[in-house]
Amino acid sequence: MICRNPSLRQASGAPGTLDRVTGTDTSPFQHEAVSRDELPQFVLPLVVRIERGSPPARTDALQTAARAVLLLLADERAAGDGPWARAVRDWQDARIRKVVRRARGAEWRRAEALPGITVTSEAAEAAGRPVGEAGTPGEAGAAPDVPGAAAVRVFPPVPLDGWPQDLARLQVSGTDLADPAPPPPAPPGVPVLWLAPDLGMTAGKAMAQAGHGAQLAWWELSDDDRAAWRAAGFPLAVRTPGPAHWAELTASGLPVVRDAGYTEIAAGSCTVVADHPALHRA
């Protein structure tokens, strides 16, 4: 694994695993002299709602998944003595895995009955359905009913072999989504998660990778910048740059996600660059 910057977090995995490479002086997490593969392994489950005949747009789903990861990381239940804090710490001390599954109808309603956070897309928010109350089943994200709008529910980390039954039965495949039209340029000043232009990732894979990128940006920010991003509702955009811009991004020192090569793409492939305006400050 290549590290261009000693304080840079890089990521790897599939459907999504993330591996920190950072010093104890810069990391907010534990760094022990032990292989992270030897630690108990956890996974962060994400479920995207895909109803027959009204699937979300691909870019909307990726952005919503990334925001869902941020909302979980910033949730008070994931910090201190909160009920999710131990699971989040254990998850982050080992390899950081994310798995995206799909649900519809009764499957989605059962998923919303489990502790977690439902996040609706910005398209749904614009139609009057804001981000769901953390952990409140059935609100906001339960039925976006906005063409192309996404709803994603994120859950506290679970052991690799300890998925709740209502999540374990959901399918990983079938998340091949499309955009009805090319997304517009990202709004000025909005954090951007740049996707590799030459990798043919499924939407589920790309959602996990976008979540990694958002998490890397979150780790790199100061407490003040995190608070400001959270207060703004975690605006972000997922876009695909041209090859020349991509080459500049991967050499810029910004946080980079690299894949371990377990599924879909070759090991070491750079999948996402996390570009937050605050990371450009001297």
Image: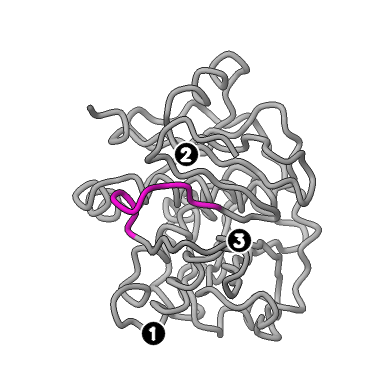
In percent of width and height, residue 168 lies at: 73, 78
Say whether residue 85 is left or right of residue 80: right
The kind of secondary structure element at disc 3 is strand
Mark 2–mark 3 Cα distance, whole angstroms, equals 19 Å
Residue 44 lies in quadrant: bottom right
Q: In this view of the protein, which residue sits in the foreground, 122 or 243? A: 243
Name the mark on residue 83.
1
Q: Toward the viewer: 206 or 257?
A: 257
- Which residue lies under the disc numbered 2? 237
Label 1 crowd bin: few (<14), some (14–19), many (20+), radius 10 Å: few
For image coordinates 35% across by 69% down, the residue present is: 75
Give the spatial CA distance, label 1 vs label 2.
Answer: 30 Å
**In the rendered image, the vertical position of residue 146 relative to residue 102, given as above or below:** above
Q: Quadrant of the N terminus?
A: top right
Please tell me whether mark 2 or mark 3 is closer to you in this view. Answer: 3
- Hey, what amino acid is under mark 2? Ala
What's drawn in magenta, residue-wise?
19-28
Is residue 18 left or right of 170 when viewed as pictured? left
Q: Which residue is mark 3?
A: 98
**Image position, residue 176 (x, y; %):** 77, 49
Which quadrant of the structure image shows residue 171?
bottom right
